[in-house]
Structures are given as C-alpha cells and as structure tokens.
Image: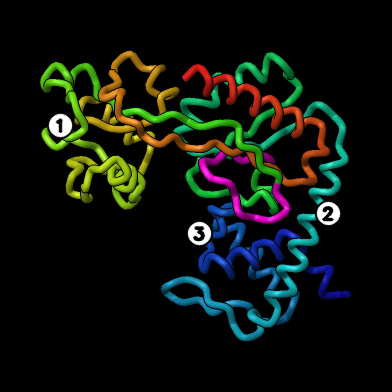
Amino acid sequence: MDRLSGFDWTQIRFFVSVAETGSLSACARATGASQPTVGRAIASLEQSLGVSLFKRHARGFELTPQGADLLPHARAMANAAADLSLAAEGRSQALEGTVRITASRIVATYVLPTILAQLQLSEPRIDIELVATDTVENLLFREADIALRMMRPSQQDLISKRVGDLPMGAYASRDYLARNPAPEKIEDLFDHVMIGYDRSSLIIDGARSLGLQVHRDFFAYRTDDQIAYWQLVRAGLGIGFTARPVARQDDKVVRILPQMEIPPLPIWLTSHGALKTSRRVRYVFDFLAAALKADLKSA
C-alpha cells in the first residue's frame, strides 16, 4: 500500500501511452500533456514502484522485462479509471459545463464554426473545446467527448451515428481559370496543373475509381495538410478537390466538371456509451447531428 500512495492514475495512463507509442513526445501528443510532464510522471512512477520500466535509447523508449510484465496490469488499471470517469460523467444531468469535440482540421475550420455559433445561441451555458486534428482521438480515455470523423470508429463501447454524406467536388480559382480554359471532360485534367496529397493515396484512389489511371507525379503540388491544400487551390496553383460545403463559402473558386461523380465522404458522430446519459453531451451530440444533417442537405 505504501507504494500505491506514491503515484496517481495519470502516471499509469502515461506509462501505458509511452509503452504503446514508444516515446515521450508521441505520448504527449496523444494525451495533450507536455513532454516534460510525461517524463516526470514516468520517473515518479518508476521511483514509486522501485523498478525501471523503460530502456532509453536513441530511437525512443523500450519496455524493460519488468515493464513488460507490469503493462497488462497497468492497462487494466487505466481502463478501470477511464470507466469510472465515464460512469460518473454519464450520470451528470447539468446542461452546462464543457464538452470536448474532435474533428478533422478541414471540418473544424470550415464546417463546425457556424454550427457552434448556433449552439452558443441555443445553450450558452455549455462550453466547447474543439480539437482540430486528423489523428483519431481515443474517446475511451476521455481525450474527447464527441468525435466527428469520415469513418466509423472501430473501438468497442462506442455509440456512432451516421449523419449524412459530405459531397465532394473539383475546384479551381477564378485566377487559374482566367489563364487556363476550364476542362470540359474528365480526360482534360491531364492537360491541367493538378494539386494532390503527398503521402495519402486518398485522391489517387478516388481518381482511379473514376477511371483515371494516375500516379503521384500526376500532381504538380502535393501536401497532406488539408488546410494548406485548400489554400493552394485558392491561390490559383491548379485544380484540386474539396468538400462542397467548404467551397461554397469562397467566391474565389469555381466548381468544375460538375458531371464528375466523386464519391462523398460519410460523416459519423461518435461518443462513448456512458456519455449518452450525460445531459450536456447528449444535447451537443443531438444538436450537431441535426445541424450537420441540415447543412449537408443544402450542400
């Protein structure tokens, strides 16, 4: 019992995260803590337990034999602590407080702000923390209360609702089209400057589904950052693709090849099952679902 008094549940959570990610920096990004905080927590946990949990080397952190033996127990403890927090939160009936939402950077930047402004008018006592990231937050460990994603999460114990499909389109800026004739058919894209992703194959896969056999070098400009990607299109560097609700906010761009049927992206809202009994989280979840559905219908 003396050793148990020397650490807290956060240290256990950091231990599990460092073991899974292999570094303090990756754990810090995953948990939202600072790297020094994670390092101090691990050191304190090792001191409390009286064992060395990790071997430090140039590539990161590797579990020692003692750390590997303790990891399953730490996972069980972290899961139990998360379940306790979720169960307590699920019984909260106050229509006030904070709800943490995570969404991709493009959705968080261009889609959610107007919806959150409507939410504020509807229920000003609810505070929102918006996490704009293209990584998948772990709802089970309360890294977010609600996730908005383009795929259905595979984690167990989650409640997901498909609220609609995000329609896509091909776009070019008015400046680009002033210098280049607009393509009239899909094959004309080979005569244009194209903007694509860097390491992601999403656009390449989509193009091939439309019958265009293209490769990475088909795109003269490439970036995986969706915000930077859209700015390249707006700046007139070439033709690119984005969600139609994003493009309709910008009079600098024009939709091209409207006959091109680009597969839409499904939008899923997800929350932990226990949080569905939290009045404020349920309110925000339902508000987002209704607002997104209405927004997508008008796109």
Q: Secondary structure at mark 3?
A: helix
Name the residue type under label 2.
Leu
In 3D space, how far apart are the residues under numbered discs 1 and 2 (Cα atoms)?
58 Å
Residue 196 position, x and y percent, is: 27, 41
12 drawn magenta: no
Pointer 2 and pointer 3: residues touching (CB < 8 Å)? no
154 drawn magenta: yes
Residue where numbered disc 2 is placed:
84
In 3D space, how far apart are the residues under numbered discs 2 and 3 (Cα atoms)?
27 Å
Residue 234 seen: no
Which SS type dominates the magenta stretch? loop
Residue 228 position, x and y percent, is: 33, 35
The answer to whether residue 283 is above or below residue 161 is: above
Residue where numbered disc 1 is placed:
188
Magenta stretch, residue numbers: 145-158
Residue 166 seen: yes
Q: Secondary structure at mark 1?
A: helix
Q: Quadrant of the N terminus?
A: bottom right
Residue 184 position, x and y percent, is: 18, 24
